Amino acid sequence: MARVAVLHNTLDGRGGADAVCLHVCEALQSVHDVTLITLSRSSLSDLNDLFDTAAAVRVHRPTGTRPVSQVFDAIPDRFGPALAPRSVLLRAAFSRLADRFDIAVSTANEFDLPVPSLQYVHYPQFNRRHAPAEAATRLDPLWSRLAGVGDRTLPANATLLANSAWTADDVNAIYGRRPTVRHPPVDPPSDPRPWAAREPGAVVLGRLAPDKRPLRAIRIVDGVREKGHDLHLHLVGSSSPMYDDYAGRVAAAAADRPYVHLERDAPRERVDHLLETHRYGLNCKPGEHFGMAVAEYVAAGMVAFAPDSGGQREVLDGRSDRLFDSTADAVDTVAAAVDAGDEPTLPRDRYASERFHAAVRADVAAVLSPSDSTTVRP
């Protein structure tokens, strides 16, 4: 049993990266002594309910976490969750605790850490000005330097994982090291309805945040309805204080349309019910690093649609009849599938959590070495 620190900058955004963190904790807690170190105010119980996980690990929040989180949450929506500076602070806090642990497992991208590590990269958080796919903020050089990776070099004793081949390519472009791809865990819901018994509606699952484009989803459904299809929409979004203003705009747009239903912070049972009983899943974020929501649609036996960019192309096997490059193209693509009566064809169990948990345990054991991974520590 090794002493494992799981590092995650913030769980308050309640997105796919946070689900991976909870699954990693759950995967490791039965075989190691696990401590989650995070600049996050969210409780494990609330997150377990949201992500249908059973993480029960020690949580360490560095001194000052609450006021720091409040400051970051007050940053206007258009600047996003400021993950890079949060990670700089988390790394500094961990450096004072590092000698208590045998290994660090980052579920919040790449770090320069003083102990052997396993690092799960959803998308590089530093040196993004060198990434081929995404723009960087003006402060990217500063955060990268403060994080200890300004020279684009990661520790030799860091093992890298990535959520998709697309992300792995960009990590390699920045750091000259290509991670092993470990797709995030997505379990099929237990009781999917047959296709003929499903409602002719679409579900959009994800944070109520500008990057997820829920307002674009509403415009797409507007357009499909204008083509004569009685399609309704469920926006099922986790909410966070950092996006309150934007979530208010989404709520106002939904309230103007009787066929758009907004369900904020829905319990997992309600999410699964919607996925099991509706035909279509829609994602609107371009350049999705993996596409947890898209994978959930596929796992639920839905016909899924997404922008033709990022890791979500892998989830949909690159199918041109499921991918779009603009709002108008999305309207045409969804309407064509409805017209044709298309049914799902992709396998539902492709990203089962049991596979992910077993792979993470094996990855940690490989970093520790077989002898260390089974030695009981005092």
Image (tube, rainbow, N blue to C red):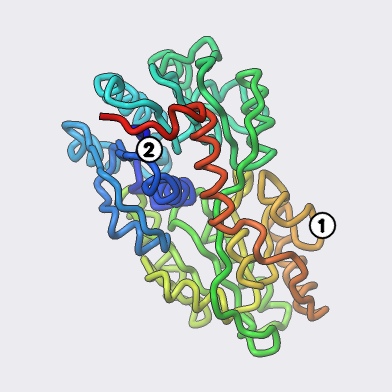
Kindly state the secondary structure of the residue where label 1 is placed. Answer: loop
Describe residue 13's horizontal placement relative to residue 193 as left or right. left
Residue in front for this viewpoint, 146 or 335: 146
The structure residue drawn at horizontal position 47% and vertical position 72%, both measured from the top left corner, is 271
Q: Is residue 101 visible?
A: yes
Describe residue 213's horizontal placement relative to residue 309 as left or right. left
Kindly identify which numbered label has been placed on residue 320.
Answer: 1
The structure residue drawn at horizontal position 74% and vertical position 72%, both measured from the top left corner, is 344
Residue sticking out furthest to the bottom: 197
User: Percent from the top left, x then y, of residue 5?
Assistant: 35, 33
Query: What is the quadrant of the N terminus in the image?
Result: top left
Name the residue type under label 2.
His
The structure residue drawn at horizontal position 40% and vertical position 51%, both measured from the top left corner, is 26
Query: Residue 220, located in which quarter of the rendered image?
Result: bottom right
Query: Residue 185, located in which quarter of the rendered image?
Result: bottom right
**Precedes in sequence: disc 2 or disc 1:** 2
Describe residue 33's horizontal placement relative to residue 144 as left or right. left
The structure residue drawn at horizontal position 55% and vertical position 14%, both measured from the top left corner, is 152
Q: Which residue is mark 2?
A: 8
Q: Say above or below: 327 vs 111.
A: below
User: Percent from the top left, x then y, of residue 375?
Assistant: 38, 31
